[in-house]
Image (spheres, rainbow, N blue to C red):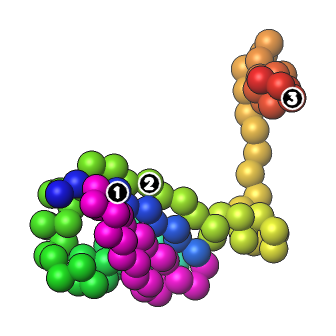
């Protein structure tokens, strides 16, 4: 049996989803754990395994693909709850960010 797992880390909850090669699906939800969102991710995987009546090791051992997304970052951008940052570059490379963000690339 081979699984595909998807995890979305949100500001409040972390959602996990698994599908196997026979079409069976399962989902689970756990609390997100800011500022260390990794704990919420791992808790969601544990909950997902339990909902499938598997150990976490069994689930992960039979998983061929994991995808992770996060809405917590988007939420931070929307609310402006982000760190102030600066961009320092060497002479001749100040346009690197502009070039990277050119539409159509």
Tell me, yes or no, if residue 34 can be seen here: yes
Q: Residue at x 33, y 50 (%)?
A: 65
- Residue picked out by circle 2: 67
Within 10 Å of disc 1 (Cα), the crowding (few <14, some 14-19, many 20+) is some
Q: Tell me, for residue 99, which label it has, or none.
A: none
**Quick one: 74 or 4, which is closer to the camera?**
4
Within 10 Å of disc 3 (Cα), the crowding (few <14, some 14-19, many 20+) is few
User: Which badge, 2 or 3, comes first in the chain's sequence?
Assistant: 2
How far separated are the C-alphas under marks 2 and 1? 8 Å
Residue 76 location in percent, x, y? 72, 69
Q: Residue at x 83, y 25 (%)?
A: 104
- Residue picked out by circle 1: 4
Task: Determine whether the residue tagged by mark 3 lies in a helix, strand or loop.
Answer: loop
**Quick one: 76 or 42, which is closer to the camera?**
42
Q: Are marks 2 and 3 in contact (CB under 8 Å)?
A: no
User: Which badge, 2 or 1, comes first in the chain's sequence?
Assistant: 1
């Amino acid at each position: 049996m081979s699984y595909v797992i998807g995890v979305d880390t949100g500001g409040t909850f972390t959602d996990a989803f698994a599908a196997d090669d026979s079409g069976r699906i399962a989902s689970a939800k756990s609390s997100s754990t800011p500022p260390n969102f990794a704990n919420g991710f791992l808790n969601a995987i544990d909950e997902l395994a339990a909902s499938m009546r598997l150990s976490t090791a069994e689930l992960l051992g039979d998983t061929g693909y994991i995808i992770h997304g996060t809405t917590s970052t988007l939420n931070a951008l929307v609310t402006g709850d982000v760190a102030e940052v600066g961009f320092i570059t060497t002479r001749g490379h100040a346009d690197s960010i502009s070039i990277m963000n050119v539409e159509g690339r």
